[in-house]
Amino acid sequence: MQKPFLTADWHNLIMINYEVLPAVLQPYLPKGIELDLFEGKAYVSLVAFHFLNTKVVGIGFPFHKDFEEVNLRFYVKYKKGNVWKRGVVFISEIVPKKMIGWVARVFYKEKYTYAPMKSSVKEREKRRLFFSWGEGMPNSMDVLTEAVTQSMPAGSKEEFIFEHYWGYTSLPGNKTGEYRVEHPSWKIYPVLDAKLKVDFKQLYGDDFSFLNSEKPDSVFVAEGSPVNVYARRILKS
């Protein structure tokens, strides 16, 4: 039985979602991978969450177990035989731990970069999540939710956004890497309010600068769970 390469607890996952034209994402598709659409529309998500109790091949490294991550991702699918695998492709992933970024670049060829971050979780009658990142903390998410979780409705946009269990990466030589992410279906917190301050052009380049003037299509928050991430393999042509 295959053992996971990485284990962790992912919690307090904020997904700020934007509808985009498929043409924006086509240049970022790994070979053999197709866009996964929801009701005919393509989405990108700006994601922030807590990465906790992190272990690589069963080893937890001091000062590198608990940290925040912010990423920009979109949704894809890959057909193997008669089965579609639904996954994600990352435009960029930001963490406040340089060694974590190094491991991800070396073993998964993911686009990890370093930036200082801070976050907070306040729980009273409601629940408030706050993330900020970058030198001087110019980027931030501030999201208010109900304090009690609920299940995701079957076939909903929430289910589409959260239920992707594969990662795909473009590799040298026009190859594609695939890795599996394993976790139970998550509970979600109903979102009451969300404030976002992000410079998409500075973080993600000209291709995504238009998001600076776009309003999010939706904002979702998931409770999270323990997660297993398995070793990358290379897809056959």
Image: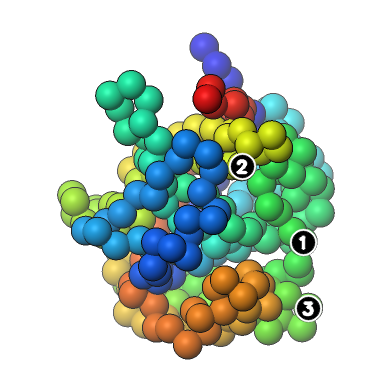
The answer for how far apart the CA atoms under marks 2 and 3 are is 29 Å
- Amino acid identity at mark 2: Ser
Circle on res. 170 = 2
Q: Residue 217: where, in percent of width, then height? A: 33, 74
Q: Are marks 1 and 2 in contact (CB under 8 Å)?
A: no
The answer for how far apart the CA atoms under marks 1 and 2 are is 21 Å
Task: Say which residue appears at 74% left-offset and 44% top-offset.
Answer: 105
Q: In terms of sequence position, does the residue under pointer 2 or pointer 3 come before the other?
A: 3
Circle on res. 135 = 3
Q: Which residue is mark 1?
A: 114
86 lies left or right of 110: left
Furthest-bottom residue in this view:
213
Q: Classify mark 2: residues with Cα within 10 Å, few (<14), some (14-19) or many (20+).
A: many
Q: Are marks 2 and 3 in contact (CB under 8 Å)?
A: no
- Amino acid identity at mark 1: Tyr
In this view of the protein, which residue sits in the foreground, 108 or 125? 108
Task: Say which residue appears at 38% left-offset and 41% top-offset.
Answer: 77
Q: In terms of sequence position, does the residue under pointer 1 or pointer 2 come before the other?
A: 1
- Amino acid identity at mark 3: Glu
